[in-house]
Amino acid sequence: MQRYFLEETLFQDKYVIITGDDAKHIQKVMRMESGDNVICCNQSGECYTAELTEISTERVEATLMEKEEAAKEMPVHVTIAAGLPKADKLEWVIQKGTELGANGFIPFEAERSIVKWDQKKAKKKVDRWSKIAKEAAEQAHRQQIPSIEGVASLKDLLLQFVNYNHVLVAYEEEARNDEKSRLVNTLKATKDGENILLIVGPEGGFSDREIEDFSNQGAVSCALGPRILRAETAPLYALSAISYHFELLE
């Protein structure tokens, strides 16, 4: 069943009004008719089966029916802080990371980021990333869309550490040193509802100074298995491991 994330103001007691691109998608792409059902989610993460009752050029109206009870979100909240990678790799991380359950994404300018952030294109870029996250959340039947922040500086990122219960840095040198326990130990110490910030570097990895800055602010550097992963692979590996630990390993 097709899923749509809608603004809170579109929900009116027992019905919902769907407008904009979502209404066009229902009409032009899905070619739905009155009586068809969709799932509508509000910004609080509440999702309802809704029956389409009126379809016009500008909007679609639907009656709210049964509330979705099954939990689709991870029991812990994982935010990915990604050093800006080349080309469209960050879009890939956002799309696949959303499918795997990430709660949010913070792109940041690492020392070895080849791509330099163009502030003039900031809004357009964040809007595109947000659209990718929304579409991926709908496809994956999530109940919430991950947050997407504008590109942060290293200093800005360090200031955000206080907002998290645990901060992990995926560091390739730990894999070379055969480090195996820190990710597992951190997950064992993490309780349902807590926040994890996972920091991954760009193609060139982290500088010694960045690792020192992270460590001084309380971050724990860890390996993601014994192999060296690409910048776009590391966050997906970590999200898969976290999902397995909290959602499958019972």
Image (tube, grey):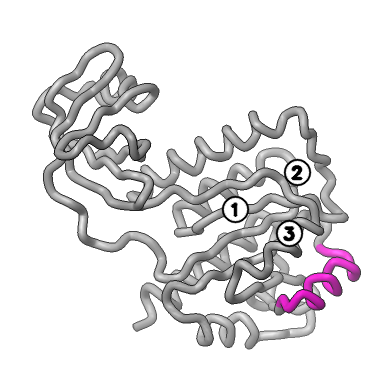
Q: Nearer the viewer, mark 2 or mark 3?
A: 3
Circle 3 SS class: helix
Q: Is residue 119 left or right of residue 22?
A: right
Is residue 30 positioned above or below 108 on the image? above
Magenta residues span 206-219
**Label 1 crowd bin: few (<14), some (14–19), many (20+), radius 10 Å:** many
- Hey, what amino acid is under mark 2? Lys
Q: Is residue 98 left or right of residue 223?
A: left
Residue found at the very far left of the displayed protein? 35
Residue hosting label 2: 86
Q: Which dot marks residue 150?
A: none
Disc 1 and disc 2 in contact, CB within 8 angstroms: no
In front of the other: 205 or 56: 56
Residue hosting label 1: 105
Query: What is the x, y in percent for residue 245?
Result: 45, 78
Residue at figure coordinates x 38%, y 81% from the top left: 249
Is residue 221 positioned above or below 3 on the image? below
Residue at figure coordinates x 75%, y 43% from the top left: 86
Which circle's residue, 1 or 3, is located before the other in the chain?
1
**For residue 220, what is the image quadrant?**
bottom right
**Label 2 crowd bin: few (<14), some (14–19), many (20+), radius 10 Å:** some
**Label 3 crowd bin: few (<14), some (14–19), many (20+), radius 10 Å:** some
Please identify the quadrant where the C terminus is shown: bottom left
Residue hosting label 3: 157
Marks 1 and 3, how far apart at CA: 12 Å
Circle 1 SS class: strand
Residue at figure coordinates x 22%, y 35% from the top left: 12
